[in-house]
Image (cartoon, rainbow, N blue to C red):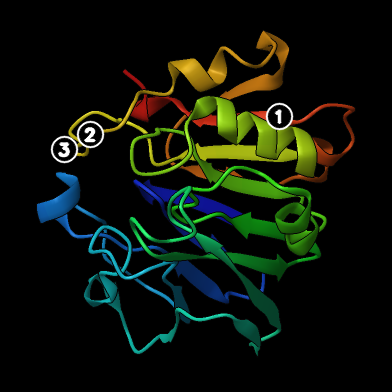
């Protein structure tokens, strides 16, 4: 399967069968960068803020998922877990949905705009994960240190940081540096372009690998 980062918290996940999922599409007026328009079978929205719910930017007639539940779409299992966009049980910014996908035998988790710190209850609700997509930029979400706590608890094979300051971004969030400093250099893998082809070799190591799309780093 392939993972293409479209910027901010938006990814295009493509199974070998051709089934495609877009996570958290965004508006340029909010994020400051143009989202590539592309077709998808499913769109997931972690919450209803305009930098995460711009379904209009997804072509075709996708199924839109924004609530908690379980679905099976063209052979892909999808589920979502309730969490909060802040550390006050949603009183500041509301709820957030964490989505999980099983594609080509790989378990992927998109944390959305998670704002609450890691707890045993929430981590157990997420369960086993091969690929974790997690915000690290702070301010509106968890910061680098809090994201590392999730990584240490969940222990994914791959972590893909998202929702951090990239060239052209107008969002008031931190750059990636602080998160990367929490890992050993041999854990960090820099990728040319925007697409990662998930290979089983990533799952045969003793430590989590951090994937960085280097075109989006200052």
- Looking at the image, residue 59 sits to the left or right of residue 104; the answer is left
Q: Determine the secondary structure under disc 3.
A: loop
Task: Please determine whether, in this image, residue 184 is positioned above or below residue 134.
Answer: above
Please tell me whether residue 208 is drawn above or below residue 42 in the rendered image.
Answer: above
**What SS does tag 1 mark?**
strand
The residue tagged 2 is 172
Q: Residue furthest left?
A: 29
Tell me, yes or no, if residue 156 can be seen here: no
Measuring from the top left, give residue 143's x and y in whole percent: 47, 31
Locate residue 39 relative to residue 201 in the image: left or right: left
Quadrant occupied by the N terminus: bottom right
Q: CA distance from mark 2 to mark 3?
A: 7 Å
| Residue 10 found in image quarter | bottom left
Q: Which residue is mark 1?
A: 209
**CA gap, disc 1 to disc 3?**
28 Å
| In this rendering, the label closer to the viewer, 2 or 1 | 2
Crowding at dot 2, Cα within 10 Å, few <14 / some 14-19 / many 20+, comes out as: few
């Amino acid at each position: 399967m392939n993972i293409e980062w479209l910027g901010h918290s938006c990814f295009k996940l493509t199974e070998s069968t051709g089934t495609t999922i877009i996570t958290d599409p965004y508006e340029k007026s909010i994020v400051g960068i143009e989202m590539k328009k592309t077709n998808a079978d499913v769109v997931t929205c972690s919450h209803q803020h305009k930098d995460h719910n711009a379904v209009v930017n997804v072509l075709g007639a996708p199924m839109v998922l924004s609530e908690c539940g379980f679905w099976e779409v063209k052979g892909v299992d999808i589920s979502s877990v309730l969490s909060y966009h802040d550390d006050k049980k949603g009183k500041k910014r509301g709820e957030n949905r964490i989505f999980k996908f099983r594609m080509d035998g790989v378990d992927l988790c998109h944390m959305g705009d998670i704002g609450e710190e890691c707890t045993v209850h929430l981590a157990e609700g997420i369960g086993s994960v091969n690929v974790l997509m997690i915000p690290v930029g702070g301010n509106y979400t968890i910061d680098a240190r809090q994201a590392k706590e999730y990584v240490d608890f969940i222990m994914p094979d791959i972590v893909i940081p998202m929702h951090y300051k990239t060239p052209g971004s107008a969002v008031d969030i931190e750059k990636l540096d602080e998160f990367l400093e929490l890992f050993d250099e041999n854990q960090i893998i820099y990728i040319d372009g925007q697409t990662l082809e998930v290979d089983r070799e990533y799952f045969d190591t003793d430590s989590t690998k951090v994937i960085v799309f280097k075109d989006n780093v200052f």
